[in-house]
């Protein structure tokens, strides 16, 4: 098997790298917001950068040209995702949600009008979606969701509550799962809607995350009226559409590149630091920790390549996405924990300390990596999916 990229793909990688060197704002690098650490200031920078990517056609590079894409191959899309992640570019989680999770679902299930209206604006970087899936009593068992959408003339009227809605307070639209037939079996009465977050009757309440940042929200729908044309796909077919959308969500392309950058920083730190008169890099335990991370990150990279390859062949990744998500999320936790061991007490210092190392990134990664492996469906649920879809084991 030849895993090398083609000359054209390597040239594209060079072009992306050069562009990123010019375009990543200095202020973003100073703020260095990790995952789930957005602030109002970083959000503005991320939105500006998103539009710049959009102008270049690189926000949704694989989209058809009629919807603002460049029809780039999935391999080039992978190269771009790797470079964006490795360079810690200002790309928020919501860009990922909007471009790589919501948009492919619109492409598959949306009406002509919806494709025209939303895909072009997504590709330009003009709009952001949040996901309205989880509810106080529906997380892993998402099919138990209770938010109702009831037809009334030309509208649907929505009532209910969502929770853990990432960046719902900043999003333009909600990609909402709601119950449209309460009498049908629970997997069969759900539909998907696009809801403008400025519609009267919607309110959000912040939930502070483990990093003490406002990324999560509770979102309340109180007699929210939306036009019937905002139903996506067929009424009551939402569960099937959700499952496909979640497979996009779980494909985790790009994480290995982000993790590679952390590993390289740890290697540099080990080379440049002495402890008890000895370079850290000559300590056998630390060498082993780093070598192990290098091996595992290579596995994560190959899993991401497999998924990109499947997309490029028009094959929809299913349990393969779950495998990648489990491996990557657990690897990120292992990387953060190994980093904490390597940095020792310095790893516990926050950015405001003059002794902080690597902008306290490892400590922040340690905290944020608790959430990876829960969002998008917990790793236990991913293992259930692999057991059922990958190994054909019975559901129970
Ligand atoms: C960082 C982050 C961002 C998120 N963003 C969003 C968002 O934008 N929109 C949104 O709708 N939701 C979002 N979520 C919510 C996420 O989808 C849910 O947290 C997740 O589906 C788990 O649901 P729960 O929290 O209700 O846990 P529960 O379902 O109550 O699960 C509790 C525990 O039981 C285990 N468990 C449950 N059922 C099974 C089973 N059948 N087999 C084995 N183990 C099981 C779970 O693995 C978990 O460990 C986000 C979560 C996180 C952490």
Image: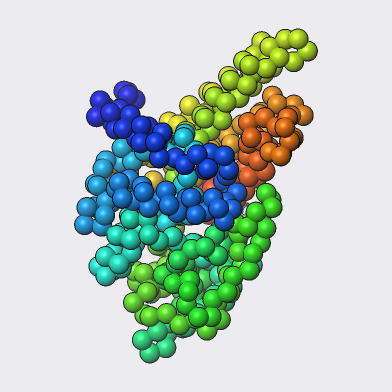
Is residue 126 visible from the viewing direction of this image?
A: yes
Question: Can residue 333 be seen in the rendering of this structure?
Answer: no
Ligand 1's quadrant:
bottom right
Q: Relative to residue 8, is residue 146 depicted above or below?
A: below
The x and y percentages for residue 229 are 34, 77
Task: Name the colour scheme.
Answer: rainbow
Left or right of 316 in this view: 336: right
* Identity of the residue drawn at 57% across and 39% down: 30
Task: Say left or right for 325 vs 59.
Answer: right
Q: Nearer the viewer, residue 56 or 7?
A: 56
Residue 180 position (above or below residue 338) = below
Residue that extends furthest to the front in the rendered view of this protein? 26
Measured from the top left, where is residue 245 in percent x and y?
42, 57
| Residue 26 vs residue 342, the one in the foreground | 26
Quadrant showing the N terminus: top left
Residue most extreme to the bottom: 153
Q: Residue at x 46, y 35 (%)?
A: 87
- Return the x and y of residue 354 as percentages of the image width and height: 72, 32
Q: Nearer the viewer, residue 287 or 34?
A: 34
- Percent x, y for residue 378? 59, 50
The answer to whether residue 391 is left or right of residue 229 is: right
Q: Is residue 374 above or below residue 193?
A: above
For the point 54% across and 24% down, the residue is 264
**Count of numbered circles on the image:** 0
């Amino acid at each position: 098997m030849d895993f090398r990229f083609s000359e054209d793909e390597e040239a594209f990688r060079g072009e992306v790298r050069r562009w990123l060197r010019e375009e990543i704002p200095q202020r973003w690098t100073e703020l260095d917001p990790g995952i789930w650490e957005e602030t109002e200031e970083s959000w503005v920078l991320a939105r500006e950068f998103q539009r710049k990517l959009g102008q270049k056609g690189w926000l949704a590079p694989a989209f058809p040209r009629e919807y603002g894409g460049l029809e780039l191959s999935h391999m080039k899309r992978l190269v771009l995702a790797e470079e964006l992640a490795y360079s810690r570019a200002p790309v928020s989680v919501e860009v990922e949600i909007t471009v790589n999770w919501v948009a492919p679902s619109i492409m598959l299930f949306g009406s002509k009008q919806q494709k025209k209206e939303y895909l072009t604006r997504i590709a330009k970087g003009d709009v952001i979606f949040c996901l309205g899936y989880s509810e106080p009593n529906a997380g892993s068992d998402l099919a138990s969701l209770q938010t109702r959408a009831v037809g009334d003339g030309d509208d649907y009227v929505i009532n209910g509550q969502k929770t853990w809605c990432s960046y719902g307070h900043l999003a333009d639209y909600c990609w909402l799962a709601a119950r449209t037939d309460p009498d049908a079996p629970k997997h069969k009465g759900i539909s998907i809607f696009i809801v403008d977050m400025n519609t009267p009757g919607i309110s959000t309440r912040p939930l502070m995350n483990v990093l003490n940042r406002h990324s999560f929200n509770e979102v309340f729908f109180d007699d929210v009226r939306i036009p019937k044309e905002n139903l996506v796909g067929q009424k009551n077919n939402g569960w099937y559409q959700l499952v496909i959308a979640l497979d996009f969500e779980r494909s985790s392309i790009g994480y290995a590149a982000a993790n590679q950058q952390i590993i390289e920083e740890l290697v540099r730190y080990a080379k440049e630091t002495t402890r008890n008169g000895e370079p850290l890099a000559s300590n056998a335990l630390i060498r082993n920790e780093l070598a192990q991370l290098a091996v595992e990150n290579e596995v994560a990279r190959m899993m991401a390549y497999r998924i990109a390859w499947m997309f490029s062949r028009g094959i929809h990744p299913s349990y393969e996405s779950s495998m990648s998500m489990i491996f990557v999320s657990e690897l990120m936790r292992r990387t953060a924990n190994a980093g904490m061991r390597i940095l020792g007490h310095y790893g516990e210092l926050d950015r405001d300390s003059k002794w902080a190392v690597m902008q306290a990134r490892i400590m922040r990664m340690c905290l944020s990596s608790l959430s990876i492996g829960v969002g998008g469906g917990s790793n236990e649920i991913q293992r259930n999916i692999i057991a059922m879809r990958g190994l054909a084991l019975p559901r129970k």
